Amino acid sequence: MTKVRHLPPLPRIPVFDVIIYFSFFYRDWHQNIKSLTFTGIPGIFRVLELMKIHIPNSVWLGNIDPFLRSFDTSNSNKLEISAHEQWISVHPVVLSMVAVLGLDCKPEDVAFPNLEAKSKHYLERMGLFRLLGVESGIKITEHEPSGRFIPLTQIKEVGTLEAFIEDVIPLLHLKPQQAQPIRYILSELTRNVFEHSQSKTGAILCAQYYEKSHTIRLGIVDRGIGIKQTISNAYPAQNDTDAIKLALSPGITGTTRRIGGTAQNVGAGLFFIKSIAKTNRDFFMIYSGNGIYKLLKTGLKQKVRLYADPLRDKHSESNNLPYWQGTAIGVDMNLDSPEEFNDLLSIVYDVFQKTIKARRKEYYQKKARFI
Amino acid sequence: MTQDKKNIPFYEFVGRFAEDKDKARHLRQDILWPSIKAGHTLVLDFTKVEDITQSFAHALLSELIRETRGEALDLIYFKNCNKTVKKIINIVVDYMTGD
């Protein structure tokens, strides 16, 4: 029989002027390295819990899972960010997640040790240092015409969203019909953060154009209450993945159980966005709490079919990822879509409408009784 | 059709992209509802509005349609809508009227 050792919690001892790493002495207690530091105010000490996050050279929605499993964000208020030494090209959702974790820390508690010039340049261009208030030591003055991206941005107030979208969409250099779905997705996802997440840091987002795949990739992240807590206001969810699947279902919103929704919420936003991605044969990912749902690409030889039930879509899911406080959403949008945006909306709406009708029928099961 | 119609130039309220649900609520509560309750005909003029989200259109119209059992639509004209705006307004109207 295995003997269980009950270890005392990590002692939080005040230490002056130095950072002491406990990884050796206290490795039994915590996986992450712990440190203590003096705040500069006599008698007041902060316990800094160091989290290390490494940005690999290539992360996209198809292979993002190992990255998501590579760090644990619980109780971290000191962040060390490293990156692949050669080059990095990562999905904007990765950068947005790194950025929002950095925003949980004070600027002086965010470190970028051993960052090579190429990675540093990329992170500088995407606005990571600026957003975190950290001096990168480099300045980019040259005009780069190939740069088609929305740099990391923190939307703190929903009232600024309209102007933000108006300002940044031109940065992607899209044709009007290509800009429509991007604008739509940016608006719906960011509004969700303010309407449902209770995130104190608002929404963090960025987007980038990838020439090789002719795709816009977009990431929107928050550190709010997460989908399970939101959806549980109206529907019981067993776990985070269940909650995500409910949130993706047509007509389901955390604000009401009423079929048809309220004046402000109808439960269509995430279903529409997932369906736009599906029709476009793109990836789409939601990560919240311990759960992830990832819509996988539909092959070119396969016919695209939209389903109300996200389980019927070709997807992967897990409910045992490291806990993410809040929600992280990644979207890909191929720009070669043969569908015009309004045709695409018609296709998606048809499924939405049929599902709501069926749900109404199921709900109002009563029939006239004749005697 | 001799009745005076009140023109609401949406571009002046929402710009090119109608996505702000708070503005939609304001338009609904402070402009559309009072006119409809008074029996006035409204022209929602979408000239220069390029895009609209489903959420905006829903926030603008759903309560009006629900609470008047669709009769509000008899007092509303949608003017100069492009294909996408027309599509999304139709989506919301169809959804609320059960078509």
Image: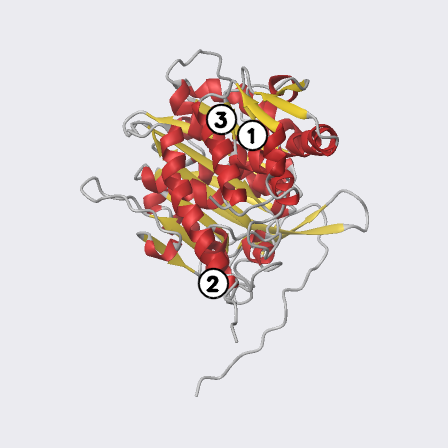
2 or 1: tag closer to the N-terminus? 1
Residue in the image at 32% along x and 39% along y: A279
What type is the residue that disc 3 sits on?
A: Val
Crowdedness of circle 2 by 10 Å Cα count: few (<14), some, many (20+)?
Answer: few
Badges 2 and 1, same chain? yes
Badges 3 and 1, same chain? no
Q: Is residue A104 visible?
A: no
What type is the residue that disc 2 sits on?
A: Glu
What type is the residue that disc 1 sits on?
A: Thr
Residue with the mark numbered 2: A362
Chain ID, mark 2: A
Crowdedness of circle 3 by 10 Å Cα count: few (<14), some, many (20+)?
Answer: many
Q: Residue furthest left?
A: A301
Residue with the mark numbered 1: A153
**A331 and A310: which is toward the camera:** A310
Chain ID, mark 3: B
Q: Residue A326 in the image: state x and y as whole percent.
A: 56, 49
Mark 3 or 1: the one toward you: 3
Whether residue A18 sits left or right of residue A128 in the image: it is: right
Badges 3 and 1: C-beta atoms under 8 Å apart? no
Tell me the SS state at disc 2. helix
The disc label shown at residue B85, or none: 3
In the image, residue B89 sits, relative to residue B81, either above or below, namely below
Tell me the SS state at disc 3. helix
Q: Is residue B26 visible?
A: yes
Tell me the SS state at disc 1. strand
The disc label shown at residue B66, or none: none
